[in-house]
Amino acid sequence: MAWEYNENKLAELMLYVADKLRNDRAGGATKLNKVLFFAEFAHMRRYGRPITGADYQKLEWGPAPRRLVPVRQDLVDNGLATVEEEFFLGYLQHRLVPSGPVEPTLLSEEERLTVKEVIEDLRGLTARQVSQLSHDEEGWRMVDVGQTIPYEAAVLRRPVMTASVRARGEVLADQFSRR
């Protein structure tokens, strides 16, 4: 299903997340991208729709909105944010910093709650750790680099391999290998 994309809402979401990550030392561009992804897909799981409808593409280090760079540049060009460089654990990170207070008008209360919950879930994790979590998402695993991750993949989960299922599989594999 195609979701209606709202670029103004993506810009507001980016500012909102950047504002919430101000005090997170690991809150650079990579973590921002992953919070955006997890928020959109968590919202899809919970409410059956994404927050902005933005296309998220698979990149080597995890998913990111396809329109991230031009939207971020518009925020900078319009004086709504800056991109600051700072080192964290020896890595240079690029941090989106809102120029003033962020008062979201396009995000609903439930959307803001989803974002807050995702940020809380990811609190204390580095960009590398959050990237690894995104690589565990079925949507990221099912597409090739550069392809769009379908929102419908938000509801996909890896099958859980219980001890009894594994034991039964081993018995069957042993039986078939003797033939």
Image (cartoon, rainbow, N blue to C red):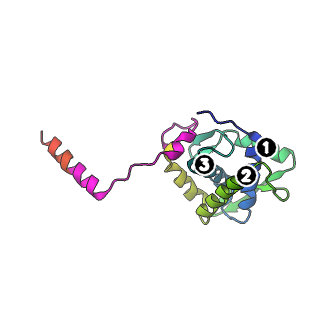
Q: Is residue 19 visible?
A: yes
Please provide percent x and percent y for residue 165. Answer: 28, 53
Residue 47 got which mark?
Answer: 3
The image quadrant of residue 60 is top right
Q: Which residues are magenta?
A: 141-170
Distance (Cα) linking label 1 and label 3: 30 Å
Which of the two discs, 3 and 2, labels the residue nearer the N terminus? 3
| Disc 3 residue crowd, few under 14, some 14–19, many 20+, Cα 10 Å | few
**Which residue is nearer to you in this view: 138 or 151?**
151
Q: Which residue is mark 1?
A: 73
| Disc 2 residue crowd, few under 14, some 14–19, many 20+, Cα 10 Å | few
Distance (Cα) linking label 1 and label 2: 25 Å
Which secondary structure lies at badge 1? helix
The amino acid pointed to by label 3 is Tyr
Image quadrant containing the C terminus: top left
Asked if 123 appears above or below 179 in the picture, the reply is below
